Amino acid sequence: MSHKSISTYAGEISLTQLFLIFFKIGCISWGGYMALISVVRSEVVGKHRLIDDDDLMDGVALAMLLPGPVAVNVVAYVGDKIRGPLGGAVCAAAVILPSFFLMVGFAALYLSWGTMVVADKALAGVLPAIAAIILNAGWKMREKALQGPIDIAMAVGAAVLLLAVGGIWIVVCIFAVAAVVGILRHRSTRTDATAPKTRQHPTFGIGSRVASLFLALCIGLFLFLPQSSVTSILVQLFSVFSGMSLLLFGGGYIFIPMIQEAVVNAHGWLSLEDFAASIALGQITPGPILISATFIGYKVAGLAGAVVATVAIFMPPAALIILAARQLERISHLARFKDAQSGIRTAVFGMIISAALSLLIGIANEASSLLAPAAIFALSCVMLMYLKKGEIWAVLIAAILGMLVF
């Protein structure tokens, strides 16, 4: 974890500016959690220089070990590093809002007309551009992540394992091995007693207390509401989604069978057809697939239901990562902890590269012809790496080309 503290960043940018930066990120982040993280890296590390690559990779590593959507958890972590818990909440809300608005619009159209609004051609064009965006982010991180043959071997190993096996337990094993290698490799001459200490996050300030109370409320409702006589549909929605969000290890797709059991089988809020529509629409909006919760909430209780379900699925894990980050900050000055983190950052780099490769492999398997996707991918790489254009231009041009050629 970087030694820069919250006080270093707090005076440099307002909450309004943070909101606008992450709202923009939320508008262009199609293609999964690593695509969103790549855009976060471009805007927050590269363009605005609010944190460094070490901070970002620490956030990715922590988010992958905790429940909830990785991308939104990383955003909450970054916002907390910059402006504390309130900054984490603002950034998480901002990055979700574009997907929320789109999903509410899609849900209203679907429920009115009985058909889905699906931009298949535009999405087919955007996916190669997203692979280029992820690859570009990894390319920019390479100098810090790869400093010798051992780093290269760890990064390649992490990428191969994720591509070949995948799953939350593989991630845990990769991080554990990378941490041990980092400690053995560096064998820092500093001792834990003499390592310089930095200003630490306040462990239980007002923001931490609010986050703790919020988590306690979520867990309490999830555990005890089924035994109570509360009939409010909004309270039930909040209870179901907030509880599920804290059990969601291993990525957004684990969400599908869990929520299907709750909203289709247990509560009967949606038909199987409507639930399938919510997942399909979640695929074509920017941001995480968990935005499908917005559709479900809208179907059950209108706009208020959409808001409640969205807050419940995203905010409990975000609160949890902020609390976890603050606890880790207490030991961030220890020499061995720093050495372990250096190894984990190298593994995270390998995971970023594997995400780009996985997306390219998926595109190749689905495409009837590789010519158009390859051309869009190459054009996006040129725009990002050589012409230094922003991600938003790569996404827009790819979407237009997709509608023209697919």
Image: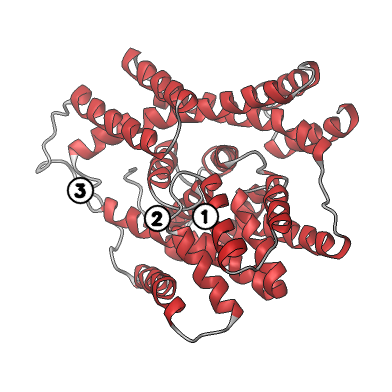
| Disc number placed over residue 51 in the picture, else none | none
Left or right: 130 with respect to 349? right
Marks 1 and 3, the one that precedes in the sequence = 3
**In front: 355, or 17?**
355
Quadrant of the drawing holding the N terminus: top left
Residue 56 in picture, x, y percent from top left: 44, 41
Find numbered disc 2 in the image and state the secondary structure of the residue it sits on.
helix
Query: Which kind of residue does numbered mark 2 sit on?
Result: Ile
Question: Mark 3 and mark 1 in contact (Cβ < 8 Å)?
Answer: no
* Residue located 48% across and 87% down the image: 229
Query: Which kind of residue does numbered mark 3 sit on?
Result: Lys
| Disc number placed over residue 321 in the picture, else none | 2
* Residue located 66% across and 63% down the image: 296
For the view shown, which residue lies furthest in the bottom direction? 229
Q: Which residue is mark 3?
A: 197
Say above or below: 238 vs 248.
below
Q: Which residue is mark 1?
A: 258
Question: Mark 3 and mark 2 in contact (Cβ < 8 Å)?
Answer: no
Marks 2 and 3, the one that precedes in the sequence = 3
